[in-house]
Amino acid sequence: MKPFDYQRPDTLSGAHGAARDGATFIAGGTNLIDLMKLEVMAPDTLIDISRLGLDRIVPHGDGLHVGATVTNSDLAADMRIRRDYPVLARALLAGASGQLRNKATTGGNLLQRTRCPYFYDTATPCNKRSPGSGCAALGGEMRNHAVLGTSEHCVALHPSDMAVAMRALDVTVEVEGADGTRSETALDDFYRLPGDRPDQETTLDAGDLITGVILPAPFGGRQTYRKVRDRASYAFALVSVAATVRMENDRISNVALAFGGIGTRPWRDPDVEDLLTGETPTTALFEKAGDILMKDAVLREGLEFKDTLVRRLLTATLTEMTQ
Amino acid sequence: MTFDLKIDEPHPEHRADGLAQGVLEQDNDRPDGWLKVAGTATYAAEEQADDMLHGFLVRAPKIGAVSCPNVDDVRAMEGVRSVLRDPRMIRNAAQGTANEAPAQGVDRAAYVGQPVALVVAESFEQARHAAQALVVSVEEEDKPVQPDAVEPEKPEDKSTELGDLDRAMSEAAFTVDAVYTTPSMVSAAMEPHAATAHWDGETLTLRGSLQMLKFNRNELADSVGLDPKHVRVLAPYVGGGFGSKLGISADCVAAALAAMELKQPVRVVQHRRNVFEVNTRRSETRQHIRLAADTEGRLTGLGHEALVSNLPEEEFSEPVIQGSHFAYAASNRTLGMKVARIHRSAAGSVRAPGESVGVTAFEVAMDELAQAAGVDPVNLRLRNIPEKDPESGKPFSSHRLEAALRQGADAFGWSHRHAAPRQQREGEWWIGTGMAAAFRVNMVIEAEARISLTRDGATVMSDMTDIGTGSYAIFGQIAAELLGLPLDRIDAQLGDTRFPPGSGSGGSFGAASTGTAVWLAGMEIRKQIADRLGCSEAELTLKDGKATYANKRASLRDLLSDEPITGHGHVEPGEAAEKVRQATFGAHFAEVAVSDVTGEVCVRRMLGSFAAGRILNPRTATSQCHGGMTWGIGMALTEELTHDRRDGHAVNRDLAGYHLPVNADVPPLEVHFVEELDDWAGPMQAKGIGELGICGAGASILNAVYNACGARVRDMPATPDRVLAALPS
Ligand SMILES: Cc1cc2nc3c(=O)[nH]c(=O)nc-3n(C[C@H](O)[C@H](O)[C@H](O)COP(=O)(O)OP(=O)(O)OC[C@H]3O[C@@H](n4cnc5c(N)ncnc54)[C@H](O)[C@@H]3O)c2cc1C
Ligand code: SF4
């Protein structure tokens, strides 16, 4: 681990003041510290954001504002979340382990880095870690990699469960720039595709601090999060789905579907939802939704199974939710 | 005085049953348990010294000739005291019982991950940062890393050819002919390998995390070039080993060399990612199994041929077929091993080498036969129990498989099972049950122990280790039983080469081998007490600190002078191994649910029924079986060390990527012991239990998966994608 300075400001302006080149915010540290130990990330200053008062969940219009340092455990346990956004509570509880969720934060979870094993291995080339060096995963062992949104430069998955649920919920990310200006970005626009710059993962600028996430008014309807993984806990998703569905007169009146384990970012495809909206639920319809979802998938060696798995999961989940 | 015993003959006199204290076979606490729970038992990396230096191992990123062009820059980094590139550093951990240095050297990396330097600094963080800064350039050599990329060696001494299997196959009423694979696996003990070395100019004292100290001392001495007399190794507490700490490890040798060079204590802790590649892995296996059976399911022929791998110069090869030599009767037999020399990290003993993967695959094949022949799987095993060793013709020392099968089946409720697959469903989940037999060779190895009895109590001493298995507890019980003392008056001191050489922990032989040495030492003391009382040892009763013979009664305090009485026990394997075939047996039963949507498998309950001789402490024995059965879940469903296809490196080398079963994967585990006293196992009639629990456990799960949903998975682990692919449409 490279030696670094550590600062723990008490105010947002203090945090912005400390943010300069080479500085990195640290929240729960559950991802950052691991990466620093391996020197995949080597900031020279850490700005601890745990004392900025960003740890509250408060009403915001008809929805909620979730502070950036609210822990995954607290968010999952919050009565309003459990009642009005159960898909989110479930996704959170499907992630990591109890100990990690106690430390992991809302902002940190959105910004966690991929689990591509080559990204963590400084002995191998990786365009995300050192742009232009190549991609060791291509031609190597791919199982926890993406099939949608990939490029010839990077096939890394976004590993978050929470962010998948949030994508289905249409959340907005609230950001404060280094100069103190506040902006809001829909989560749909927050993550970039890897293209030829897989190191640039979001639309954040240097020094931008996530202050919170805004949940819109409760969607109602049925909600679920289902994660398929290699062991029952403490494993990333092979494939996951976050679904919210409302029915009217036995037809699907409103549906949102987001997927984990398949995309380079939490994946949502408006064409899938358009197909389903207004329709009577049938297995054939759901299978067609699977076709649309996977139409651009690139099934590299080792990842073929994701095609079958995600289609089955989609059909089963929609069948259950529209019954 | 020494009581020497060579196990040449059976021990039909069951002395343990006639002793008076009544602590043997009892469910007693482990004396080290509280220390471990409270965090006061110190592990190798917790050793303190004011002037401690810290070493960090540097790994080779490629296979080939290694050089480090910026060594001088790194030496100049803050806090750095040395960059060691010593030819005595070891390539990988020694194999169990090697007793000499393993392959050494830092100039040529035989596998990716090989330690090629040690950076020593004043703090751990400085050492680690400097280690990262050290440039390791490799002139790459093109070496095979895939087992099927080379022509394998065929060790002749590891094959059996009896009768004509091909003919038996063609004439059989029912056959199975299939290939099963298991991936590389690792021990993944909780405590990473770590060592603290002290050098006083003459003696090297090493606190390590090791399983077999008498061998480890010699391996270390040979590696660094010292006389073993000048080497002391300690490992009083070890946080799990599972085979990976049998031989001296890279951290120990590097720490010793650094301490000798810098004349300061040096600590080297293997980073978790080193642990996965510097220590021995279990080889991947490819197993071709053939079964030929008559109309009743009686085996007329069996074949078990396995391909495993290892690095050049490593003698060990995963003994996949070890259990198949004696598990089932069949007159036509083809058993053989092939070893591919490839450049993945070294393979060695991991959790029941041989049977854990060999019996597991074989027991899946037996399930396939049961299905084909329409015979109940339990009955199929019962029908094929051999009367004597099917290859050598030797009698079995004791054979309780039938009892294990019947008692296990009863306790599990096997009779309620649906014979055909896909009969029971709960929502999207298919429910099914499966079983497998368990086999494991039993071994005794040479061991010594000493007991010193004073007026206050007794001290048991051996360099034997307790790697979390319960050695402290059991040796205390044996000594207390023989000497007639309450447990709290026994102090067991283990894990120090200054004590008599025990067996070490490995191959499930620890409790029975070193335990027998403790028993003999206790017997020796009993004789001396009997002399003082004027009776024979057998006439003596010792209980609660009092000695009784006929109408004479004396307290031990009065019988003893200020001089302690010492007894030394020494056991060696003898002709027993020539005269009889000795093994432990068991049966596994599992119930699973399999998702028809995702292929996920959830184990709902498991039951194991085991025969392993006298059970010295049911609690520690049960814990061993729980561990084994949990490993069975890992083997069947989750564990796989993935090697990069291009350079063979271990890709998922941490506990997040290498999927050991977690609590949520492990259902209630029920363990039953079958009554057994194996007279050939020595004066305690006790056999090894540590590894039996894993052998075949995974097969019961895979067989249950088949019974649930009809998916026959032959490539382990049965991850959701593999189950889905095998699911009948
Ligand atoms: C073994 C393991 C298993 C896991 N399993 C899962 C899983 O199954 N599912 C899952 O979803 N996750 C899983 N995780 C990931 C875990 O959820 C993340 O590590 C965690 O959410 C990160 O949050 P943090 O607060 O600890 O972030 P940190 O580690 O503190 O930060 C992560 C990154 O975000 C930046 N950052 C943090 N907060 C802000 C902010 N407010 N503004 C700007 N930048 C910020 C940091 O600079 C850093 O780059 C697992 C992690 C581990 C170690
Ligand atoms: S997939 Fe992306 S993260 Fe993984 S090695 Fe390639 S570039 Fe790096």
Image: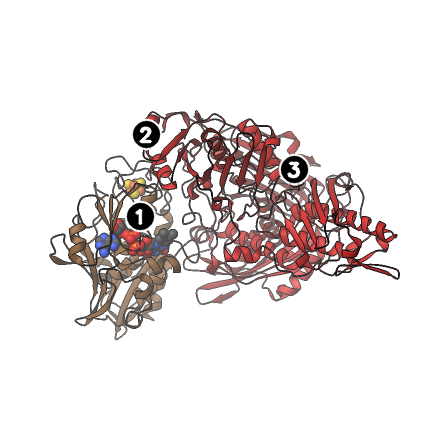
Pointers 3 and 2 in contact (CB under 8 A)?
A: no
Q: Is mark 2 on a helix, strand or loop?
A: loop
**Upstream in sequence: badge 3 or badge 2:** 2
The reply, left or right, for residue A119 in relation to residue B218 is left
| Residue where numbered disc 1 is placed | A146
Q: What element carries label 1?
A: loop
How far is disc 1 from disc 2 in space, using C-alphas?
Answer: 43 Å
The color chain B is rendered in: red
Amino acid bearing label 1: Ala
| Residue where numbered disc 2 is placed | B76
How far is disc 3 from disc 2 in space, using C-alphas?
Answer: 61 Å
Query: Residue, x 56% and y 54% (percent of image)?
Result: B627
Residue A292 appears in view: no
Q: Position of residue B424 (x, y in %)?
A: 52, 65
The color chain A is rendered in: brown
Look at the picture and state if A239 lies above or below B89: below
Q: Position of residue B149 (x, y in %)?
A: 47, 31
Which chain is mark 1 on? A
- Quadrant holding ligand 2? top left
| Residue where numbered disc 3 is placed | B334
In which quadrant of the rendered view does residue B154 lie? top right
Q: Where is residue B166 in the image (x, y as percent from the top left)?
A: 65, 38
Residue B99 appears in view: yes
